[in-house]
Image (cartoon, helix red, strand yellow):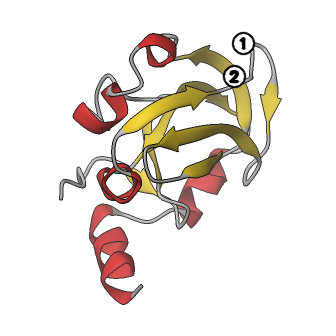
Amino acid sequence: MNHPADLKYSKTDEWVRVQGDQATIGITDYAQDQLGDVVYVEIPLTPGQQIGRDQKFGDIESVKATSELVAPVSGEVLQINELLKDHPELVNEQPYGDGWMLVVKLSNPAELNDLMTAEQYIAYLEGR
């Protein structure tokens, strides 16, 4: 499995890519693999909306299960990946690329300190 070293990871299997005061959020390669073929992604947010850390921001459905998407950081929603409406399979094909979920402007950058590095995330998965 692929877990890029430049990302931060949550225990709920979301990843965060930080660029300045913005964070792109998606689900990990591990999460998409556990779900199987993704057939539906719903993110009922709009740009400008605030989202809190550990708050549900959507649902993802696969041939195996439905799972909640949980925000690993707080912030203002800047962008939602509209491609996922018609192409949810991007989550399986490119979980760290075109399969991203949303971009937020960080409201509390210190929350990043509570996320795991790739190395820590791999150890966490091995201990599950």
Where does the image place residue 77, in percent across and percent down from the top left? Answer: 69, 22
Q: Is residue 23 visible?
A: no
Residue 101 position in % (x across, y down): 51, 29
Q: Secondary structure at mark 1?
A: loop
Q: Amino acid at mark 2?
A: Val
Asked if labels 1 and 2 touch by Cβ distance under 8 angstroms, the answer is yes
Q: Please tell me whether mark 2 sits on a helix, a strand or a loop.
A: strand
Residue that appears at 30% across and 51% down: 29
- Report x, y in % for residue 23: 52, 33
Label 2 crowding class (10 Å Cα cut-off): few <14, some 14-19, many 20+?
A: many
Q: CA distance from mark 2 to mark 1?
A: 5 Å
Q: Is residue 94 left or right of residue 67?
A: left
Work out which quarter of the rendered image holds the N terminus and state it: bottom left
Q: Which mark is residue 47?
A: 1
Q: Which mark is residue 65?
A: none
Give residue 103's quadrant in the image: top right
**Mark earlier in primary sequence (2, 1):** 1
Q: Quadrant of residue 90?
A: top left
**Residue at 37% from the left image edge and 60% from the top image edge:** 34
Question: In terms of depth relative to the viewer, which is nearer, 89 or 112?
Answer: 89
Who's the residue at 19% across and 53% down the image? 2
Instruction: Answer above or below: position of 28 versus 126.
Output: above
Q: Is residue 103 visible?
A: yes
Q: Residue at x 52, y 53 (%)?
A: 65
Q: Is residue 126 above or below residue 67?
A: below
The residue identified by callout 2 is 77
- Is the C terminus in the top left, top right, bottom left or bottom right quadrant? bottom left
Q: Which residue type carries mark 1? A: Pro
> 76 or 98: nearer the eye?
98
Q: Count residues near mark 1 (Cα–Cα under 10 Å), then give few for <14, some for 14-19, many for 20+.
A: few
Q: Position of residue 108 (x, y in %)?
A: 71, 44
